[in-house]
Amino acid sequence: MSQARAKKRGYDLESRPENQSRRRHLVKDDEWITDFIKRAPFGYFATRWDDQPFVHPMTFWYDEDKHCLYMHGAMIGRRDANTKRHEKIAFCASEMGRLLPSNRALNFSAQFRSVMAFGDVVEVTSEDEQKHAFYGLIKKYFSEMELNRDFSPIIQEDLDRTRAYRINIKSWSGKENWKEETPVNPDFPPLDEKWLQDDSFPMSYGKMG
């Protein structure tokens, strides 16, 4: 195989941008990505300290007007240190559906949806934007609760005890593979119906085993 052909079949950032999927038929548009990222309850942020990568599971919210993500963190810690050292950051959120069994080992699969985003992270320093970030988090996760009725306004002491971060999104991508079944081996006995139910496997729908 020629080097050019091998490069085309493989992956590198020069020939394929970070937000371009190899499996084009699974790719979703911006409207789908926006809807998914707004509803996703948890995200994973990838940072690094020089050549050591880290992943941070975090609550977050997406600001559609600014096309950015907001998250918060401790005043001192790994996430804060990493993002001050390297501003580039990656993000992922996903949803797992039903596990899809097969009678062929190659074809075991799972339903999934996911979004990835890439950009630069900055610490939010203005009081107005800090409050915007924190009130946005509260609104996303505790939308039924009302300011001044169920909880008190943010005060300076609150701002002094936590940091807010803004991820300016440079590129993103969405992918969905929510097929109802996976290919089978026609030359092997078919699957028993007991394996084809929603509750056949305890880890379906992303549940802990």
Image (cartoon, rainbow, N blue to C red):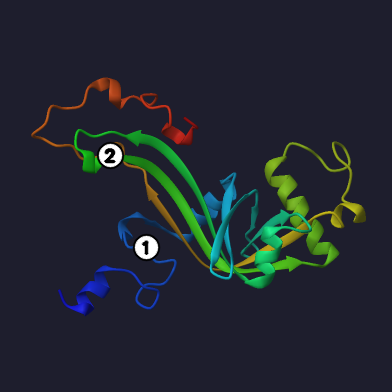
Residues at badges 1 and 2 in contact (C-beta under 8 Å)? no
Specify which label sits upstream in the sequence, 1 or 2: 1
Element carrying mark 2: loop
Spatial CA distance of label 1 from label 2 is 21 Å
* Amino acid at pointer 2: Phe
- Image coords of residue 76 (percent x, y): 77, 59
Image position of 76 (left or right of 185)? right
| Quadrant showing the N terminus | bottom left
**Residue density around tag 1, few if under 14, some if 14–19, many if 20 or more, within 10 Å:** some
Image quadrant assignment for residue 184: top left
Q: Residue at x 38, y 78 (%)?
A: 14
- Image coords of residue 176 (percent x, y): 39, 50
Please give the label number shown on residue 183. none
Element carrying mark 1: loop
**Residue density around tag 2, few if under 14, some if 14–19, many if 20 or more, within 10 Å:** some
The answer to whether residue 171 is above or below residue 189 is below
Q: Which residue is mark 1?
A: 21
The answer to whether residue 138 is above or below residue 66 is above
- Image coords of residue 5 (percent x, y): 20, 75
Q: Residue at x 11, y 31 (%)?
A: 188
Question: 162 or 38: nearer the eye?
Answer: 162
Question: 49 or 9: nearer the eye?
Answer: 49
* Amino acid at pointer 1: Ser
Question: 138 or 50: nearer the eye?
Answer: 50
Question: 125 or 39: nearer the eye?
Answer: 125
The answer to whether residue 18 is above or below residue 112 is below
Q: Which residue is mark 2?
A: 108
Q: Residue at x 42, y 32 (%)?
A: 204
